[in-house]
Each structure stands twice: as C-alpha cells, then as structure tokens.
Image (cartoon, grey):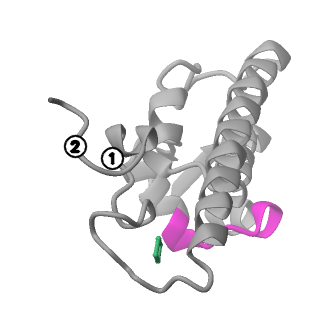
Amino acid sequence: MEPEDLLPIGEVTRRTGVAASALHFYEQLGLIASTRTPGNQRRYRRHMLRRISLVVVAKRIGIPLSEVQDLFRTLPLDDPPSHADWRRVAKLWRAQLEERRTQLEHLQRELTGCIGCGCLSLKACRLLNPEDALGEDGPGPRRI
Ligand code: FES
C-alpha cells in the first residue's frame, strides 16, 4: 500500500464533509476502519471515502445506520465497493424508498380522513391504532 493511499482524518473530513466525531462514531459501528501511525494518529485507506459517501447517501434518504451496518457486513472492508456492490445497494435502497413512499401515501390518505374529525379515538382512528387489521373490514366485532 502506497503512503498516499492512507489519508489523515483532516483530509477525510475535508473531502467528505463529515465531522471527525462522526467518523469516530462510524468507526465504532464498524462502518469504516482506520489504521494507526507509529505516532498513534488515525489514517484512513482511500477507499473509505466511498464507504463514507454511502453512509452520507443513506442518511440523506433516511436509511437507519443499523440497516447500513447490516448492509456493510456484506461489503468488503479491505477493498473499495465495486460497481456491482453499488448497484446492489442502490437497488435495495430504491426498493426501501418505494416502500416508504407507499406507507406515506397510505398515512396521507388516513390523515385526510381525520381532517375535520378530531375524535382521536383509540378505537376508531387508524392513525392511533395502525395495527387494527380487522378494522379494515369495518366497525364492530369481527370475530364472532
Ligand atoms: S381523528 Fe377521528 S378518525 Fe382520526
């Protein structure tokens, strides 16, 4: 490995826009890794910039860090993610965004039904009782 492949933390924060404290946190989570100089300073391999970029994108689209952790366990830590890796990640996140969009549309429809109601009923209001699967069949007892 060439010395220029190892970046000091200041360079990584400058190039990614991610604060040093956040980089330390990502490292604790195992999302990225660093090595130490003989003087005990952190150095990041150049390809960590890509992993950090993926974390930035994930945060931007609302993917929880725990899910990023799960996903990163499938990516090599010692090598940069390949284009195939990136395609796989992008496909997965696109599907998650689509699912979230569908959920938001569903919530929007339910909220529209609540406008002007204001009952905030724990039994009748779907926003307050989202697990009420039987309620989709209508009001009243469903299991008799
Ligand atoms: S507030 Fe009445 S149904 Fe939601």
Mark 2, residue position: 141
Q: Are marks 2 and 1 in contact (CB under 8 Å)?
A: no
Q: Amino acid at mark 1?
A: Asp
The image quadrant that residue 125 belongs to is: bottom left
The answer to whether any part of residue 106 appears in the image is yes
Q: Which residue extends farthest top?
A: 84
Percent coordinates x, y for residue 41 in the rendering: 49, 60
Q: Is residue 121 left or right of residue 11?
A: left
Q: Nearer the viewer, mark 2 or mark 1?
A: 2
Mark 1, residue position: 132
Quadrant where the N terminus is found in the figure: top right
Classify mark 2: helix, strand or loop.
loop
Q: Earlier in the sequence, mark 2 or mark 1?
A: 1
76 w.r.t. 37: above or below: above
Q: Is residue 111 left or right of residue 134?
A: right
- Identify the residue at image location x=45%, y=64%: 127
Classify mark 1: helix, strand or loop.
loop
- Identify the residue at image location x=67%, y=67%: 18
Q: How many marks?
A: 2
- Identify the residue at image location x=54%, y=60%: 23
- Identify the residue at image location x=58%, y=23%: 78
Report the Cα–Cα distance between label 2 and label 1: 12 Å
43 w.r.t. 119: above or below: above
State the extent of the magenta-drawn residues as a range: 14-22
Q: Nearer the viewer, residue 9 or 143?
A: 143
Q: Residues within 10 Å of mark 1 (few under 14, many from 20)?
A: some
Q: Is 71 one of the magenta-colored residues? A: no
Q: Amino acid at mark 2?
A: Pro
Quadrant where the C terminus is found in the figure: top left
43 w.r.t. 142: above or below: below
Q: Is residue 139 left or right of residue 51?
A: left
Percent coordinates x, y for residue 16 in the rendering: 77, 61
